[in-house]
Image (cartoon, grey):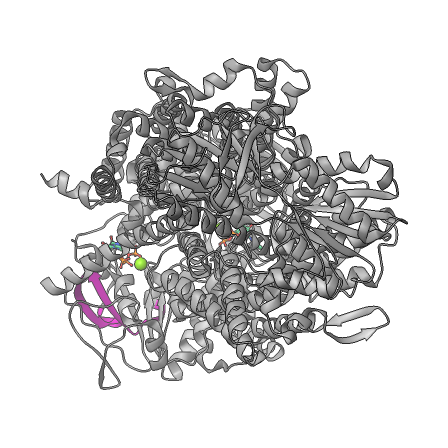
Amino acid sequence: TVAKKGMKADLVLMPKFLGILVFDQANQGAQEAHKELQNPGKLEFLGPTPENSVAGQIEILTTATTQGQDGIMISNNAGDQIAPAAKSARDKGMTVVTWDSPIPSAEGEQLFIAQVDFNETGTVMADMALNIMGDAGGDFAVLSASPDAANQNAWIAAMKEALKAPKYSALNLVDVVYGDDQSEKSYNQALALVDKYPKLKLIMAPTTVGIAASAKAMQDEGLCGQVKTSGLGLPAEMVSYTLNDCAPEFALWSFVDLGYLSYYATYLIATGQMEGIPGETFKAGRMGYYTVEKDPTRAEGLRVLMGPFTVYDKSNVEAASK
Amino acid sequence: MMNVWKYLRSWEGFLCLVLILTISVNAVNSDAFLSIDNQINLFTLSIEKVIIALIMAFIIINAEIDLSVASMMGLAACALGWLVDAGASMPTALATCLLIGMLGGLFNGFWVTFMNLPSLVVTLAMLIGFRGLARVLVEDRSIRVFPSWFEELGQQPILGPLPLAVIIFFLLLILAVVVLRFTGFGRYVYVIGINKEMARYSGINVNAVKLILFTLAGLISALAGILFAARLGSVRGDMGLGFELDIITMVLLGGVSIFGGSGSIYGVILSILIVLYLRNGMSLSNITGHLQTGVIGLLLISSAMVPNLKTYWESLQASRSK
Amino acid sequence: MSPIQGLRPEKLRELVLLILIALVLIVFSSVIENYLNARLFNRVSASVALMAVLAIGQTMVVLTRNIDLSVGSIVGFTAYFVGHQLSQYGDMHPMLAIFLAVGVGTLMGGINGILVAYCRIPSIIVTLGTMALYRTLLVEYSDAQTVLTVNLPRWLLDLPSLNLISFDRLHLRVLVVGMIVVVVLFQIVLKYTSFGRKLYAIGSNPEAAKMAGFANQRMVLTAFLLCGALAGLTGFMFLARFGNITVVAGIGFELKSVAAVVVGGVNIFGGSGSAFGAFLGAVLIDLLENSLIRWLQISEFWRDALLGLLILISVATDSVIMKRFQLYWARKQARSSPET
Amino acid sequence: MTQALKEVSLELFPGEIHALVGENGAGKSTLIKILTGIQQPDDGEMIFSGNGVQLSSSQEAQALGIAAIYQEPMVFPDLDVAENIFISHRTRGIWVQWKKMYEDAHKILSDLGMILDVRAPASGLTLASQQAVEIAKAISLNVKVLIMDEPTASLSNHEVEQLFKVARKLKQENVAVLFISHRLDEVFEIADRITVLRDGEHISTRSVEEFSREQLIREMVGREVDQFYATRQKKNYGKRVLSVKNLSKEAVFSGIEFDLHEGEVLGFAGLVGSRRTDVGLALFGIQPNDSGVIELDGQNVSIRSPQAAQNLGIAYMTEDRRKLGLAMPLSITSNITLPALKRYLGRLGLIQTESEKSTAEEFKNRLQIKTPNLSHEVGKLSGGNQQKVMFSKWLNTQPKVFILDEPTRGIDVGAKAEVHNMIRELADQGMAILCISSDLPEVLAMSDRVLVMREGRQMGILDGPQATQESIMSLAMGELQETA
Ligand SMILES: Nc1ncnc2c1ncn2[C@@H]1O[C@H](COP(=O)(O)OP(=O)(O)OP(=O)(O)O)[C@@H](O)[C@H]1O
Ligand SMILES: Nc1ncnc2c1ncn2[C@@H]1O[C@H](COP(=O)(O)OP(=O)(O)OP(=O)(O)O)[C@@H](O)[C@H]1O
Ligand SMILES: [Mg+2]
Ligand SMILES: [Mg+2]
């Protein structure tokens, strides 16, 4: 399907919470698409506060339903707890699309715009770990966001799965700890990991806050030679650590593109130009063609896979950080 | 006529005025506001906090505070999920959860009464402690095991448009008004709040009253946790995180003195309505996140200033008439 | 003459805390391998530096029978604000940056103080409100941007790892020294100046303080100003240590600082406690947290449950011992009562 | 709005001790609050050393050299005794010199004849010791005008004499002393001139020689008061109600033994801090005893809590009205029915307001509580009327044994006579009364027998004619004597 421009749909883009850079980037992408498609309706960027994320997301979804919005794009932070609200939004005829982080059970969700393949995330992380630690391998630990973050949990699970392959047999995952996406907590957790596991060689942080905090902690304590940091990070935040070898390698995708793609998919469904069934193909403006497919990483649910991963290292990080 | 005037100048009168103002502004601002759906929704979305606010009013009037309610709520919900997951029958699991609530409350009460520690300190510690136990039970999982009747009970209306939680709230509200206003126990709650040594010297069993209150707070928090689990259909370790401050805000805005000894359920219910309507009105006007919290904060401070302005005004009048 | 003679209540409290800290060290060194080493000192001292400064600010307020729940938001705001300024004007003098942080903090504390002292609104209400307001201000001001380490000047990034003195692998960091200066300064102010003593008096019996002609309102305002200033300083330290500042910076610090203060034996109802005590409270909590994290036997998830319980137990121990002490005074008094 | 003071004039000269007397609620305390800048007058002026002054805070009063000891002691419980004395000194400077402060405090207190540990926190002090600290504080200020609002209300003879010594010394140093007391003996002993207030109005100011006792009372009360301290008729009392044997509490009191009969009033005398209150508290279960036997109606009982005491028919009326006696923001009615609230509960635990009201009405008439209405806040009544409310509160529990702790503390002559009448009446109706009082004439007048305590020990029980001021004092001061 190629989108017909100028059809009206009031849409809402909902991040996990307000005040985080990557979500703002997604908003930029969505706004870009909004203009491009000349939607006479409105695009609102509404989100809760970090302290009140779960209840706040549910509240915003419910209010959007009451307001009679045509569609909502959710970066879900509430796990399955948002499902009842999502279902009743669907019952009222609203389009519910998730991005960044899906509803695990897929209940109430029409489509998930996956930034990358979640299984691939696991492999990418395992590969980075292998690259950094070398064939000799050794101990490494994961510093995640909160224990409740669905996408982080999925990635970690995928990584554990990937690690079973013989290629990674020298890598030894010793612990998973949580920094709640707060700099101070992540920083302290990273240091504690070093103390707890004297032979630790790597901290893998699949969260932009965690990876930056961990890299800084290692740098401040002069541990960069001993313990490296890797994971998912923003080039702008990581560039100095990559250059001084504290975090030689990390990965991410474009959040601007993710917002852009999510908007296209949601617009098409909300305006009735697309049904959102497996096999459908649509054109997302400058990003080209995408196909709706069954999500292989979840029991239920459909997804659109954006991809690809960009793995950053000394060679490309500076350019990307501009 | 005199009475009406006098009422309007009382605290409750002031709150009433603010409430009417909020409702009118909302009604003008959004067509959806006055719909039955929205009215029920705005209640349902915060019903757990609102229920706990009732018992919190008792505790603050008693010159104590309970910061652990939200953690207890999370603990009870997680315990429910854990128990059902482990194969317990629903009735057993529910009863166990309520028991956990009572025991937790009793535990708080023990330190406050027999060990004579300030409740702020005890419940601050248990805010961390109960939350920790909830985490121990569910770890990084999201447990989704409830039978469908349980979820329906939490999500579907059962009496007219009213869901179970709202009905429970109204029953508890009536009970709270009667107990606080018209019973001997209510009188004791006030007297102890005014001066607990004096109450002891008057032959009142101060410790018993306090123990009962803390136990009830635990019990009702557990009940709220169960309702929360039913409404969201699944449980996670972060349920109700940070609710305690919202709950306390509602109670204080209702004119309950933080120093104990004064306040009424009537004021609390008005302030609950104000907070809910204000939040809902803002959400409907697409004001979310921190701005919403900021407005509530501003309201809390400015409303606390009104009685002082009143006395100032009166003294001004008095000095002028002289 | 018993050895306890001449011990003031604060002194005893501090002694009890020191014993508790020693106890924690002993217990954990028996269950954690390689526990007692220079690294532990470095870790705990560096992370306690922030919380201790904040806790001392909180102490000033708590002594006057008030509480400041907005400190977390003040820390977050100043950290972001100063970080933002430094990213733009990288050549700003370090001293100016510190003054800026302290100044912004003082201003915010001042707003709290005026509302509490002159508008007579209970502090818990005021600071519950400003906690939300200052955070809102931060979010609006930041516009979802993050202060990035890369944009910060070199000297700031080097600050947290800068050692003043090192003995072998034992490092005394500059930030830690800053914290020690604050502790000593405020300990002296509270113990040896009339201003400090009047703070105690006001918290102990506000009505009597008024009758005695103390400027209660001005004193309470001053306490809040100091608390704000120290929160601002903490904000600066936060910026230096963590570099990446988002809108969630400092969330939860308010309750942590209150916990440190009460564990440190500062009476939550005002009138007693000390800066040194608050410092020890911060150390004890941080030590517990740090040790629990490092204890292999204990899963990530058990930590908070245990931490809550241990906080409760240490407060209870303190209270039980203080009660004994009071009884001792009473008996002594009884023995020396009107000798006619 | 009621007016607390109407066109009151008062002159104070250096080197005089001026007594201010009047009934409860006459406006004495209010006048003092105005003199010290805590409250501001609506009208009128104040002239100090020839200059008109307007005081807007107590700091300004202090700067002028006016200091006051208020009716209710105002100590800082967390600070130690020495700091309490010196904290408000304006001349203290920026730095605190602890050592010097302790030495000075010790000296001032011993000059006063009080031996207190200057390093002990004030929270453990008895009311009397607190009062002593207050006095020491005021004296150490080197004042020109010293105002004392009922400083002797909780002192016994011994301390009162010490205080008077100090007052006389100050007088010689040309300080003007304004002294308020409801104990007329003291007024006649110490004052040079007396001012009488009644209902907020100035009645008279004359030198002490121009007053006779009767006349003074007449001017205060506005009517004749007969029957002042009439001695109690010796009478046969009924069966034994309470019997206490070897009652002890570690480090507090020991070896208390007495019997109490229906219709008997047993006085408890002793110096301040002789632990009389503690015995009362033990019998009421607030601070249970740790050894000894209590028998009630011949039954061995153990009293571990106030509820238990109340169920056994014991009532205890505290000496600290403000902190322990009344719920100040609550209405008179709620206060009166509080200890016996269970009686007013209907089905479902609901309070029956009608019967509450009628009880309050009954006590209001019986004790002549002066109040606009029964829903008036107790905190807004004058001291004497508050005392009556407290009395009502405990009478309403219909106790068998009534422990009164300083029942007339801070109440005026008129009301005092009423209270005495009431105690007598209650005893005549068969109540067993234990009356702790520091007012010796009162103890003598009221009691059938007098138990004398010293430092937590029972020094003896004096029966009827044996009990005289002299015999009680000598026991209280430690001259042991064979007991009857
Ligand atoms: N806080 C208050 N609010 C309103 N009225 C008060 C207050 N305190 C006292 N009054 C009234 O002011 C009048 C004078 O009271 P004041 O305390 O000066 O009497 P007093 O002569 O000191 O009596 P007492 O001997 O009982 O101490 C009384 O009628 C009293 O009811
Ligand atoms: N030395 C002391 N230290 C601490 N508390 C004391 C001391 N002496 C008495 N108290 C407390 O003060 C109250 C009154 O004390 P106590 O019974 O000794 O006095 P009393 O003989 O009744 O004399 P008065 O009532 O005239 O002060 C009691 O609650 C008691 O516990
Ligand atoms: Mg008076
Ligand atoms: Mg006594």
The percent position of residue A283, horizontal first and vertical second, equals 48, 38
Q: Is residue D108 visible?
A: yes
In this view, the residue farthest toward the right is A136
User: Is D425 colored magenta in this rendering?
Assistant: no
Q: Which residue: 26% across, 62% down?
A: D30
User: Is D197 colored magenta in this rendering?
Assistant: yes
- B286 or D210, which is in the foreground? B286
Q: How many marks?
A: 0
The percent position of residue C90, horizontal first and vertical second, equals 56, 76
- C296 or D181, which is in the foreground? C296
Q: Is residue C5 above or below residue C304?
A: below
Q: Is residue B78 above or below residue A77?
A: above
Q: Which residue: 19% across, 59% down?
A: B313
Q: Is residue D127 above or below residue C210?
A: above
| Quadrant of the picture in which ligand 1 is shown | bottom left
The percent position of residue D481, horizontal first and vertical second, equals 61, 52
State which quadrant residue C137 falls in. bottom left
Q: Quick check: B264 left or right of C233? A: left
State which quadrant residue B159 falls in. top left
Q: Is residue D433 visible?
A: no
Q: Quick check: B166 left or right of C75? A: left
Q: Which residue: 84% across, 52% down?
A: A133
- A145 or C44, which is in the foreground? A145
In this view, the residue farthest toward the bottom is D50
- D97 or C146, which is in the foreground? C146
**Stretch in magenta:** D189-210
Q: Is residue C311 above or below residue D59?
A: above
Can you say which quadrant of the picture contains the C terminus of chain D?
Answer: top right
The percent position of residue C319, horizontal first and vertical second, equals 64, 50
